[in-house]
Amino acid sequence: MSLYFDGGLEPKTGIVAVSYVLANEPITLDFWHGHGGKRHAFTVGPEHYREMKKLKKVTLETTLVEGHSHKLFIDTKDVRFRVPGSLPIAVPDDEDIGW
């Protein structure tokens, strides 16, 4: 979800799949827009997955394109930010997996 300085939200910028969390590997995703054919991107990695498993909101930033970036957040707890129709999926914590 994009996080704007005026407190506004939108647009939804991507989906972090449970498979990403379970793989525990960094993944780079495209942001919803770009400039001159070059898109912003953001990377979600193990440090973010740890926080998501604790149901904490994670804030990150996109890559720089044309002199600016965007702040984003991932909120695994608030149903407003879930894929429509999806159900919560229990993910083992790091100790159960052995990380």
Image (cartoon, rainbow, N blue to C red):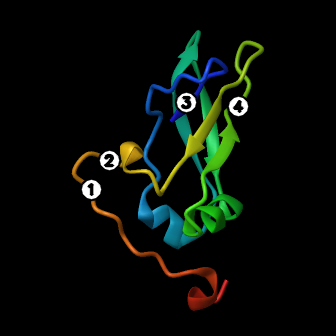
Q: Estimate the spatial distance between the alpha carbons at disc 1 and disc 2, rounded to whole Å.
A: 6 Å
For marks 3 and 1, the one nearer the N-term is 3
Q: CA distance from mark 3 to mark 4?
A: 13 Å
Q: In the image, what residue type sits under mark 2? A: Val
Mark 1 neighbour class, 10 Å CA radius: few under 14, some 14 to 19, many 20 or more: few
Question: Measuring 50% from the left and 27% from the top, which residue is drawn there?
Answer: 9
Three-letter amino acid code at the position of disc 3: Ser
Q: Quick check: marks 1 and 2 in contact, CB under 8 Å? A: yes
Q: Quadrant of the C terminus?
A: bottom right
Q: Residue at x 67, y 33 (%)?
A: 62
Q: Amino acid at mark 1?
A: Ser
Q: CA distance from mark 3 to mark 1?
A: 20 Å
What is the number of the mark on residue 18? none
The residue that label 2 is drawn on is 83
- Name the secondary structure under disc 4: loop
Tag 1 secondary structure? loop
Disc 1 target residue = 86
Q: Please report the residue visible at 52 percent of the width from the left and 50 percent of the height from the top.
A: 75
The mark nearer the N terminus, 2 or 3, is 3
Residue behind mark 4:
63
Residue to which mark 3 is pinned: 2
